Image (cartoon, rainbow, N blue to C red):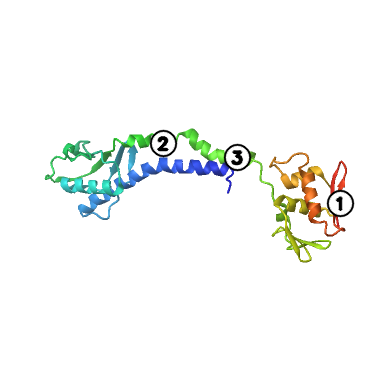
């Protein structure tokens, strides 16, 4: 099936938008999950974990109530979440006292366990209001995928503009006929099946032949101008030349020749007339 230009436009740009925005959201959800685990370990299952704020490659998480934490358990919880969420294995964590602004605990992690810096694992920290900050240096590349304003504008305005300027596909003449059978002298024609029958003989019409026959039938026994026939059958396709119409009329005549009362008459210099 051939896609129209504005459909193609959406198919290409929509995944780009989702990809660019999805990575940041994924990290934010994972960091918020870390906060949930930290509070749960402290026995707090009721207070709210605040929404994560992002500043470049740094994700900042605040808590509704004060709490205490044990460094070993904190490190384990963060490592578990990073692994489960498949985040970058390079990160730096800092717990900051909201009142004083001091970093009360911090550690670094990388895939190389020898380069990890995780101090003071056995020292419990007192109850206080803390802010968790976790930096993912490798996230900088992901952040650069942020969609620029011009692209977002193009994504919104582009499909609308294409809908307005792109010519609509011509509706098939078959869609105008709800009858199952059309009687043409001794012939009967089914638009939905594109089948022309006379007695026990049946022959199938092509799409263009069927549309031409139906357009002539719409003005039975009246002259239909060449321009009207070309527009009705070929529309904006642009795939016809001067004698294309005459060729298709000739084909129809041959398929209707079993009944002499059914004729397609050439009105010289004007168009054609279907008589039956």
Query: Which residue does the image show at 28% across and 49% down from the upper left?
Result: 84
Residue under label 1: 222
Asked if the residue at tag 2 contacts the one at tag 3, i.e. Cβ–Cβ closer than 8 Å, the answer is no
Secondary structure category for the residue under label 2:
loop
Residue 112 drawn above or below residue 182: above
Q: Residue furthest bottom?
A: 200
- The tag earlier along the polypeptide, 1 or 2, is 2
Determine the CA span between mark 1 and mark 2. Answer: 63 Å
Residue under label 3: 162
Query: Which residue does the image show at 43% across and 43% down from the upper left?
Result: 18
Q: Is residue 144 left or right of residue 127?
A: right
- The tag earlier along the polypeptide, 3 or 1, is 3
Determine the CA span between mark 3 and mark 2. Answer: 25 Å
Q: Is residue 138 left or right of residue 22?
A: left
Quarter-of-image position of residue 28: top left
Which is nearer the eye, 43 or 73? 73
Quarter-of-image position of residue 131: top left
Secondary structure category for the residue under label 3:
helix
Which is nearer the eye, 40 or 164? 164
Kindly report which numbered mark, 3 or 1, lies closer to the viewer in this rendering. Answer: 1
The label shown at residue 257 is none
Residue under label 2: 146
Q: Quadrant of the C terminus?
A: bottom right
Determine the CA span between mark 3 and mark 1. Answer: 38 Å
Residue 51 seen in the current view: no
Secondary structure category for the residue under label 1:
loop
């Amino acid at each position: 099936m051939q896609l129209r230009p504005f459909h193609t436009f959406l198919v290409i740009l929509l995944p780009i938008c989702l990809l660019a925005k999805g990575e940041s959201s994924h990290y934010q959800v994972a960091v918020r999950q870390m906060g949930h685990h930290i509070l749960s370990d402290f026995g707090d299952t009721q207070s709210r974990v605040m929404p994560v704020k992002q500043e470049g490659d740094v994700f900042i998480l605040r808590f509704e109530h004060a709490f205490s934490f044990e460094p070993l358990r904190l490190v384990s919880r963060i490592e578990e979440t990073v692994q489960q969420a498949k985040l970058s294995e390079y990160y730096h964590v800092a717990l900051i006292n909201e009142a004083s602004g001091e970093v009360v605990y911090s550690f670094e992690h990388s895939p190389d366990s020898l380069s990890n810096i995780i101090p003071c694992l056995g020292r419990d920290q007192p109850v206080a209001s803390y802010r968790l900050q976790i930096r993912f240096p490798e996230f900088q590349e992901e952040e650069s995928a942020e969609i620029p304003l011009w692209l977002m504008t193009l994504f919104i305005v582009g499909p609308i503009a294409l809908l307005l300027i792109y010519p609509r596909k011509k509706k098939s003449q078959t869609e105008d006929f709800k009858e199952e059978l059309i009687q043409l002298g001794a012939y009967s024609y089914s638009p939905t099946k594109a089948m022309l029958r006379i007695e026990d003989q049946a022959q199938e019409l092509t799409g263009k032949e069927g549309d031409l026959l139906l357009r002539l039938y719409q003005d039975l026994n009246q002259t239909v101008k060449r321009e009207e026939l070309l527009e009705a059958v070929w529309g904006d396709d642009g795939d016809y030349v001067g004698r294309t119409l005459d060729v298709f009329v000739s084909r129809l005549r041959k398929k209707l020749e079993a009944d002499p009362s059914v004729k397609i008459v050439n009105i010289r210099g004007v168009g054609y007339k279907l008589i039956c």
